[in-house]
Image (cartoon, grey):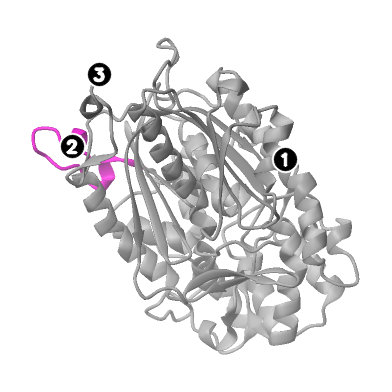
Amino acid sequence: MSPSAIPTSTSNGHFESDLNLSLRGLGVDYPPFLVGPEALETLANRFYPPSPALKKVLSINRFTGIETRAAIGDVDHPLVNQPNAPTIKELNDLFRVEGVRLSVNACTRAIQEWGGRVDDITHVVSTTCTNSANPGFDHYVVKQLGIRTSVEKILLHGIGCSGGMAAMRTAAHLALGSSYQRKPARVLVLACEISSVLVRSELDSINQEQQTRVGVCLFSDCASAAILSNGVGDDESAEPIYDVLGWKHQIIEGTEEDLGFDVDPLGWKVILTQRVPTLAAAAVSPCFQDLVKSVPELHENSQSPMAADFDWALHPGGSLIITGVEQAMNLTPEHLRASYEIYMKYGNSSSATIFSVLNKLRESEGKENVVACAFGPGIALEMMVLRRRNLGALSTNGSESDESFEIVDTAGAAVHEHLTNGNGVPHTNGTKTTTNGAAAADDCSDADSLAAEAGSSVANRHELNGTPAGDGGRGPATNLPIEDVD
């Protein structure tokens, strides 16, 4: 076979018709605790005096549309019940135990579904934004899984909520490189986040700086993994989960100050402006159009598919992100049913969420082709087109699949109705809204109506920030000034 006959990513800006890349295994592991909105209020009242900013955040917390969040502990977890917020050393020590444990569980599920041997894994691509130790957490995961020491590892940093998608894009390029060398590639892709224990740091900032940091209402804990294959030497009888057809990475210019996740002595601090939901929704359509044009096999009879011809696995950063993309792309709640489900039941687990959404999506019948999409610092937009195989196959490879969830039967309508007034518009309780989607509030009592809009919109770009396990695994708080919310 000549090199020209071997699949490559793009030619003249277009993907080859058969990249021969596929996801062969998926695994998701959420920690055992699911905490409701009341957990954050309990913790806040336990350690902080009443203040206008805290009152507003707690009001927003009741209206995010999230029913429960996954966390490594309940509201009485010792690390978030110390006199002071945990230090970055304490957070690292905890991640070394809990993060590695979740990661090993998620990877084990993905490997078991794939059916191969750990010795056949050629690459490991990992990401997290809630730990920055050296060696990285992936080093310890590889050791516990028994993967050979010569495996090629890459740990991605600085990409926040888009991390899972960026890791998959990186894995695809590595796999195609192996295809060019006529070598098999079995890439283990891993994302892990523990945001819940950052809650005290965020509450400290709310108390000391009187900022409305909404991220503390949104984030949760999770690890997820996938096995990506380049098809060389694959068992022909084994059916892939998804084929990878193409991808796109795009930076929205002039947005570096809108979304970030900065190191702090007590963990990390989210940077998130009110522009993020609007910027994100506006960027999706041109990115989608460019990506679809670059994948020739999507065009039947010279007809370009519409957004509604796909199911959408959208990173559920917040309800305004989901509903914003839904409206911008002329979608229905059914197209985004998996994103709504995961958001409501588990919250926003940053980089680890996208594989959870893809895992949930395959539980029910739907469109043949899927668009996966996430946003990260930069602002970076990651998008990928996948083709579902074995449509309607029930997944058992994630803790989110252990029990049924109402939305499965209602095809997204119940979740959408819960998050909106039934017309795609987040709840406002009659308050006036501004063009950026934030409700006007003259005093803290108006924050109740502000939540689904201001709270969700911030959530959508959280860029990971955590909250305490006991806090319900709330994620990071955003540094949205009070006057910006009003």
Amino acid type for the residue under numbered disc 3: Met
Instruction: Confirm or deny contact between disc 2 and disc 3 (CB under 8 A).
Output: no
**Sequence-wise, which precedes: disc 2 or disc 1?**
1
Q: Position of residue 207 (x, y in %)?
A: 75, 82
Q: Residues within 10 Å of mark 2 (few under 14, many from 20)?
A: some
Q: Is residue 188 above or below residue 271?
A: above
**Three-letter code for the amino acid on which mark 2 is drawn:** Pro
Q: Say which quarter of the image contains residue 132.
A: bottom right
Count neighbours of disc 1 (C-alpha within 10 A) and say few if under 14, some if 14 to 19, many if 20 or more: some
Segment colored magenta: 295-311
Q: Which residue is mark 3?
A: 1
Local secondary structure at mark 1: helix
Q: Tell me the residue at 81%/67% (across/down).
A: 87
Percent of width and height locating residue 339: 48, 47
Disc 1 target residue: 140
Name which of mark 1 and mark 3 comes first in the sequence: 3
- Nearer-the-camera pick, 116 or 452: 116
User: What is the three-letter code of the residue carrying label 1?
Assistant: Tyr
What's the residue at 44%, 46% (across, down)?
Answer: 413
